[in-house]
Image (tube, rainbow, N blue to C red):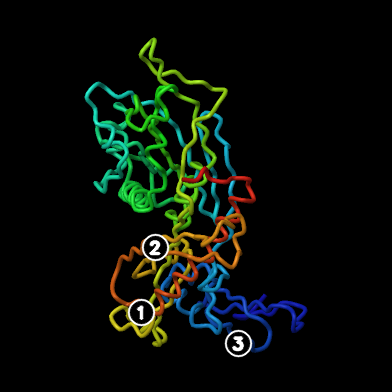
Amino acid sequence: MTGTAFDSIPTDTNKYVYQMASPAPMSLEPHGHIPKPPLTFSTSLFRHISPTLFLQRHLLQNPPTRPNGRQPHQYRDFTLTTNSLSHAHGSAVVRTGDTAVVCGVRGEILELAPGDDPSRFETYHHSSTSAVHSYGSRGSGGASWGELITINVELSTGCSKKYPLGPPGTLAQALSDQLRELAVVSKLVNLSSLGIYNPEERHDPTVKPRGYWCLYIDVLCISLDGNLLDAAWYAIVAALVSAKLPKASWSQAEERIFCDGSSHHPILLRRSLPFVTTFAVVPICESTGMDAIRCSGNISTCIVLNDPDSYEEEEAIETLAVLSTVVCEDSDVDQINAPSMRTRVEKIEKTGGWNLEESQIIHCTHLAAAKTRDYDRVLLREGLDAVQI
């Protein structure tokens, strides 16, 4: 072999030609001129490089479509399974998208000491209790806080890579406070129905209870992909509806409380069950290219996303939670779509700035009403009907 270059044989157009020239290294080129393809990225890589721009490109479509395929007003399908935990008096497993929670309700008896005032146990208090406080109140049956319902939230180790193993973090404690506040505002449980009496004195209004059932509600998140509040609250409501406490009564002869497992102590819930719906507010910029990444200070409009996932929550500048219930103006309470049914908003909680307009908030209440009706349908489909006040 002589010379500074050689060609491979055969020299077909579909074959590659190896060229060698000294001192240049060996290169691989196709026979003929073929333009180089443009530099492109995969969808997943584009999302990691510029998550804000990636979400905005989806929402600027006509119609706006989120990266998960949903439109802004759509929420994820949810499933409900009750009484899955045999050791709890009531339980529920709720899954919405890739967010899944397990809720267990466990009752413990609090026996009143002489001189205790029962009124402090039958009144909802607005003082804040965190997950740490909830654990501290277990030793005395909740009496140290003067409350009969304790809610605690935990995030399992493998629920998300953002929350490693360790003590309860900020999210778990803040969510425990938020869920407890929802229970206080909505007055979900009739606290007086948790009283334990002497059967012979049960119907005497002047007789005070000898003890109470304390409800410990534990919510464990086993998979987290955004909007944990809605899933946790729905699991709490379903677990309370399915809960069956043993029949407890005071024995005057032995001066102690006995439980009868053959019958059940009813947990009276309010007539119209409340449900919470969370929205995320995402800014949309009309700028393109790199200017869209730096448009946080020049927001032209906002889009409200129903039931945000974890990716959308990170890009949101505001969140809106609507607590609503479906009420009936007549006695026809079994038909969710009855003409007399209407939606009542009981609480609106917003965090963030002031980008939402009044018309957008009203639109959110209508979306929350539709989701509340679906929640009620699933409860009825499961054969669950609350013991109503």
Q: Nearer the viewer, residue 163 or 81?
A: 81
Q: Closer to us: mark 2 or mark 3?
A: 2
Q: Choose mark 3 or mark 1, whichever is in front.
A: 1
224 versus 301 height, above or below: above
Amino acid identity at mark 2: Ala
**Rendered image: mark on residue 357:** 1
Q: Earlier in the sequence, mark 1 or mark 2?
A: 2
Q: Horizontal and vertical percent for residue 118? A: 28, 32
Q: How many marks?
A: 3
Tag shown at residue 163: none
- The crowd level at tag 3 (other Cα within 10 Å; few <14, some 14-19, many 20+) is few
Residue under the point 56% across and 66% down: 340
Q: Quadrant of the N terminus?
A: bottom right
Front residue of 177/46: it is 177
Rendering quarter of residue 96: bottom right
Mark 2–mark 3 Cα distance, whole angstroms, equals 54 Å
Residue 4: image location, x then y, percent: 59, 80
Question: For residue 321, which numbered disc appears in the image?
Answer: 2
Residue 240 to residue 311: above or below: above
What is the three-letter code of the residue carrying label 1?
A: Glu
Residue 268: x %, y % from top left: 46, 41
Position of residue 266 relative to residue 301, above or below, is above
**Amino acid type of the residue tagged 3 in the rendering:** Pro
Give how far across and how far down residue 358 sits, in percent: 36, 78
Q: Which residue appears at 60% of the width and 64% of the height?
A: 338
Q: Residue furthest top?
A: 254
Mark 3 vs mark 1: which is more N-terminal? 3
**In the figure, is residue 166 to the left or right of 62?**
left
Foreground pick, 326 / 98? 326
Disc with the residue nearer the chain's start (2 vs 3) = 3
Assess disc 2: are there few (<14), some (14-19) or many (≥20) residues with their C-alpha within 10 Å of its C-alpha: many
For label 3, the residue is 35
